[in-house]
Image (cartoon, coloured by chain):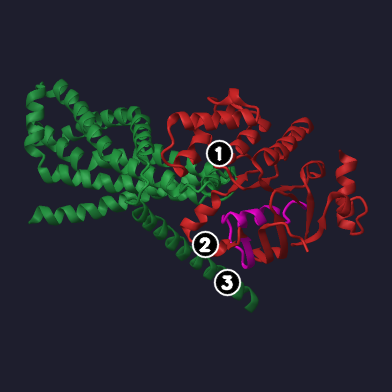
Amino acid sequence: MAGQTGTRKHVFSKKIDAFFKGLADAWNFVKRFFQEVFVPPYEFKEVIHQCYRIGVESLPLISLTGFIVGIVFTNQSRPSLSEFGATSWLPSLIAIAIVRAMGPLVTALIAAGKVGSGIGAEIGSMKVTEQIDAMEVSATNPYKFLVVTRVLATTLMIPVLVMYTDFVALMGAFINVNANELVSISTFFAQVFSSVTFLDIFSSIIKSLFFGFTIGMVGCYKGYNSSKGTEGVGRAANAAVVVSMFLIFIEELLSLQIINLFRMK
Amino acid sequence: MDNREKVVVVRDLYKAFGELEVLKGVDMDLYREENLVVLGRSGTGKSVLIKIMVGLLQQDSGSMEVFGKEISRLGVRELNEMRLKIGFSFQNSALYDSMTVRENMEFPLVRNIKNLTKKEISFRIEELLDAVGLPQTINQMPSELSGGQKKRIGVARTLVLNPEIMLYDEPTAGLDPITCVEINNLINEVRERYKTTSIVITHDLSCAKQTGDRMAVLLEGQFGALGTFEEVFPHAEDQRIKSFYDYNFINS
């Protein structure tokens, strides 16, 4: 019995050790990004290539999702507003919801699934097939070429994609509002812009920068630390999505609290 | 007394992974322009030895001196300078699969040798592809190449930086016998043409016989035998070396 308890204790303490070691590894991985990003040589060509890949790859899915979100959200909100005879507030309500929360969140979650998993799998497979080691032994910095470029690309592209999603979702909302309330496009967008503040747009962009950084960093970290074998590549891709999504929700919650502080002032 | 210049000196090298001790006090000298073949069964630490040499792994104790410098004590910049002198040909070639053959070869070249014109880069790449007999593959992706072609391109990519030492990790693994002979010839050609010093890691005795000046057999974490092929194998007294020899030649 005593032996069993001892073994259990040992396993438990080993798991705790592994957890804190993982945290320390992750922290060092993030810290290394800030140490390397400002130091030459700069891989501009690769950053542009990754920006293009991330943007183009995500565009069809984000267009479709954003458009549907706009239509569905408008449709779902109408009955509640019509009870108070306030359907004329639909453009304002939708604009605020999309710009403040839904646009960034929907884009980030889709990008985590599409881009984050792609990065995790790509770097994981490079790790497993010794391509990262090959870069290292040829006196090239693989972290700079693979991680810094991808994290920069996701950090820069997610805000662009968020603005695009906002626009597409608002177009979806307009089509629904126009079909039901016969509101013209100029009236619709006049109402949208009168209800959205600078703080809304600014906070949405800042938040998206953090989402982008998280997606890139988690994807790269999981890929870079994937264990040997194809199973490890799959796990890296899966973990990249799960961890990114989890962190995105936490960041959303934190940003909401911080932005509310500014709104109250 | 051997007067030849020693380019690699290994003394009492230890390396363990957790509780698994892989290298247990390895001693080794590598002389300029010689081909040393390191033989041993899978999992005996052959690849670990050359990975320590390029700083991909670090020893637990002992020393690994390359060109008179202890590898484990080098800083990042010094280690990278050292790596430019050592070419590493990986077991599975490790070609960058998102890049063409040309881009694979350009990658280390443009990042390590500054101020090269596009013409100079192209000339160097084409020259090396000619040397490995694959000039036609320049615009192909790695997925379009056969196993033997990948190995050759992998060697060409390491030669692009003019290394003084070449490390071949299982160069003939997974290849048919004819391609194996071609790769062995390539290893010899590389040494003659570029005056490189080489370590060939293998468990293929045909490859060892064809390419090696000296053989070193790794047994249970230490070199069990060191000498020419004739000295080490045909009349080996150690049963493990003898069975290694018998098995290889009966099967080939």
Q: Is residue A201 left or right of residue A237?
A: left
Say which label, 1 or 2, has the lower sequence index: 2
Which chain is painted in green? Answer: A
Image vertical order of residue A24 relative to residue A178, above or below: below
Q: Decide if residue B183 is on the left or right side of residue A183.
A: right
Label 3 sits on a secondary structure element that is helix
- Decide: is A185 above or below A228: above
Is residue B45 in view?
no
| Colour in which the image shows chain B | red
Inter-mark Cα distance, 1 to 3: 51 Å
> Which chain is home to disc 2?
B
Q: Which residue is mark 3?
A: A10
State yes or no: discs 1 and 2 in contact (Cβ < 8 Å).
no
Tell me the kind of residue under disc 2.
Leu
Numbered disc 1: secondary structure: loop
Task: Tell me the residue that label 2 is attached to.
Answer: B74
Q: CA distance from mark 3 to mark 2?
A: 37 Å
Amino acid at pointer 1: Val
Label 2: which secondary element: loop
Q: Position of residue B198 (x, y in %)?
A: 69, 48
Image disc number at residue B160: 1
Residue range in magenta is B39-65
Q: Chain of mark 1?
A: B
Residue A145 place in picture, x, y as percent: 43, 44
